[in-house]
Amino acid sequence: MSEAAAAHPTLLDTFGLTLSDSSLTLLAISLFVLTYILILLEKYVHRTVAALLGACAVMILGLLTPDQAWASIDFNTIFLLFGMMNIVNVLSRSGFFDLVARWGMLYTRGEPARVLWIFSLLTAVFSAFLDNVTTVLFMAPVVVTVVVRLGLKPIPYLIAVILASNTGGTATLVGDPPNIIIGSVAGKGFGDFLVNVAPYAVVATFLGIGLMHLLMRWRGDLNAEGAAERLHSIVSDPTPIRTDPKLMRQALIIFGITLILFMVGHPIGLEAGLIALTTSTFLLLIADLTPVELFEQVEWTTLLFFMGLFIVVGALEHVGVFTQVAASLTGAINGDIGLGILLVGFSSAIVSGFVDNIPFTISMASVLKELQGTLGAVMDPLWWALSLGACLGGNLTLIGASANIVVSDIAAREGHPLSFGQFMRYATPIALITTAVALGLYFLVFTLTR
């Protein structure tokens, strides 16, 4: 145990229990599994409560001190979520989403299949050039408004948005946090991801939307009965949409500045979380809104869920679970890059489906960097396999990626709760197929061109 931990007596110390390193590892894994089981039992325990219970157990049992637990929280993610929630809330107050929803209904002509394809493709494109959390904060409220007004079931369409955000975000350096980590550690630029990752992300995106289309048709979710009549009544409604042009203009300008800074900020040392926190605070300064009325709309349960989960996952990282996994993979690869693509890609996908992909990517990136020092540029394909696996694997479960949780909480707020089981019934089979196809294609191209 560290000196910091030793300086703070724990519950185990009180009872005179001294655990070996292997016992601490087992305890950390057990706590994670128990937390995950509680999250699965969402009918009885809210997932935020489950995550906070797990975090409390980690600290009480001394796996992490409170200081270490605090340090394990990825505040770049928390600041990003908090800042973008505030900007999106201001846009919502200005009437912006109502205008976009009306445009969406007109352009899709009220046809469910067009709603699915157009909003999924828009989400994927936005996610490639923004981060996927920002994109779903923007897109999910619009999709809910459109499908509810057309009399359609919103849950399948929201799941489609989640899938598109994660596959679209895989394509570029700035689309998903694992890619930002890989770019920083491996010294790869925007163009490297466009050449080596984007083609497979594009295939996964179109394949995913196509599979979702088939699945929704099979389950009757594309039933357009009455949608045309509802669209006609909405369009012919003489009641104007209530907007605040000044507030909308201010929010859109700040939103645009935020997006530009997202694309240029990382090379100059400005992380996405700091950018979002700063620009949203400036919007509060210039907008005629009080922090109290705006902060009431922040999804605090989402933020606390992530903080609790970061601490539980931080315990796994602290006892060396991710390092051991990464080292075992490196030993199994034994210099065979083709085998490495399959092992790194698929193991990253599986792990990312059940724990946050950020700490795993950091650990795996450190190991790959050491391997790069030995093998040189010949091992570059492993970086791209890690990117594809870590990003696409986020679609496996409801807690596999930040965007999933954000959309889930937006859905609950709008009166359409998304359960763990509902998500897996739609998303998991599609995630398995798209991930296997993307990594399989990458492996095939590597084999044919080496």
Image: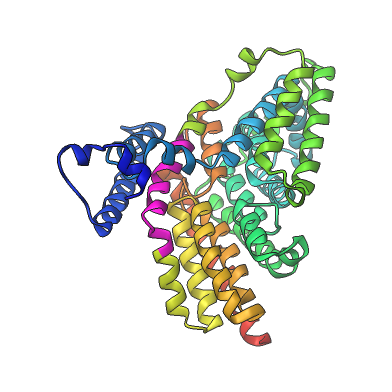
Q: How is the image coloured?
A: rainbow
The quadrant holding residue 391 is bottom right
User: Exactly how many numbered labels are in the figure?
Assistant: 0
Query: Is 342 covered by the magenta stretch?
Result: no
Q: Is residue 115 above or below residue 206?
A: above
Is 376 left or right of 330, judged from the image as shown?
right
Q: Is residue 387 visible?
A: yes
Is 170 left or right of 417, judged from the image as shown?
right
Q: Bounds of the magenta span?
A: 305-323
Going 71% across and 50% down the picture, which residue do you hit?
121
Is 229 left or right of 158, judged from the image as shown?
right
Whole-percent x and y of residue 97?
Answer: 72, 28
Secondary structure character of the magenta stretch overall: helix
Q: Is residue 415 visible?
A: no
Whole-percent x and y of residue 122?
Answer: 73, 47
Q: Nearer the viewer, residue 198 or 188?
A: 188
Q: Nearer the viewer, residue 227 or 352?
A: 352
